[in-house]
Amino acid sequence: MKLKSLFLIITNILLFGCISDSNETTTQTHITLNFNHYWDENEFTSTELNSLNLTNAFGNLLSIERLRYLISDIVLTKEDGQIIEIQEYNLTDISNEASLTYTPTELIEPGLYNNISFVFGLTNEKNSDSSYVDLNSESWNVPLMLGGGYHFLQMDGKFLNTDNEEQGYNYHAIRASNNPGDNWDSAQDTFFRVDLGAIIITADAEINIAVNISEWFKTPNSWNLNNFNQMLMQNYEAQVMMYENGQNVFTLMSND
């Protein structure tokens, strides 16, 4: 009888443990970030690439031929102040539809969160070397003479200059470099955290983010491509201006 009772106790413990594990699993879910691109009110997709039909705030007529940017370190803040960190990253490429949807591997507890945020680019700690094999394969590196590490943004295209001729531009954001060359140093961080605000996480929640590309040329710096078009990676002033304009690019649309 004692053996039978012991067997029943062990069976109940194991069964209860399995039920607990099952419940614990079902209370966790993935989140998916969808990046939806716009030029002000107009949707911008890969079909609009290479078309000289965009006008920035300064009045330059321009096209976009390539648009890629890096986001990392998602943070969710619960109502009680608890912070959940997802230390992953995603390289978004408007010409690669699969990259416009990003589902981190980490599972999240459903519920109300006071804020969701991510880093545009990489923090200095994570941008200190060139160890990301997948980013290396995308030619995402920054030359050592500019501090090494990785790009935050690559936007390339054409614009009509003051002679009404098409001219190329390379709007590339990296760490702001002061005294580029052998004595390189970084005087100002140009990665930044994007706070999207409160969201409700449900099962397999999709979080829709609006990316207004025109803001890179707009606020607070009205961007004149005649003055700032190429060789911007080593241009400290240009990098700081990009950092300032980037604050208004990303906004939360909705989550389902």
Image: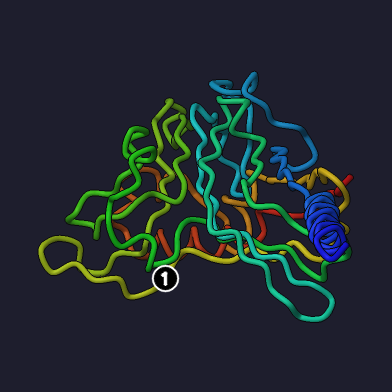
The residue most toward the front is 1
The residue nearer to you, when weighing 62 against 8, is: 8
Residue 115 is left or right of residue 142, and the answer is right
**Label 1 packing within 10 angstroms: few (<14), some (14-19), many (20+):** some
Residue 214 figure quarter:
top right
Q: What residue lies at 32% left-to-right and 39% top-to-bottom?
A: 136
Q: Where is residue 217? Give x, y as percent.
A: 57, 50
The residue labelled by disc 1 is 189
Residue 235 is left or right of residue 221, and the answer is left
Q: Where is residue 55? Give x, y as percent.
A: 63, 37
Three-letter residue code for mark 1: Asp
Q: Where is residue 245? Give x, y as percent.
A: 57, 60
Please say whether residue 132 is visible from this viewpoint: yes
Residue 115 figure quarter:
bottom right
22 versus 165 height, above or below: below
Residue 145 figure quarter:
bottom left
Residue 43 is left or right of residue 137, and the answer is right
Which quarter of the image is occupied by the C terminus? top right
Colouring: rainbow
Q: What residue lies at 64% left-to-right and 18% top-to-bottom?
A: 47
148 versus 59 height, above or below: below
Q: Where is residue 40? Give x, y as percent.
A: 74, 43
Q: In the structure shown, which secondary structural element does the residue marked by tag 1 occupy? A: loop
Please say whether residue 110 is visible from this viewpoint: no
The residue nearer to you, when weighing 206 against 122, is: 206
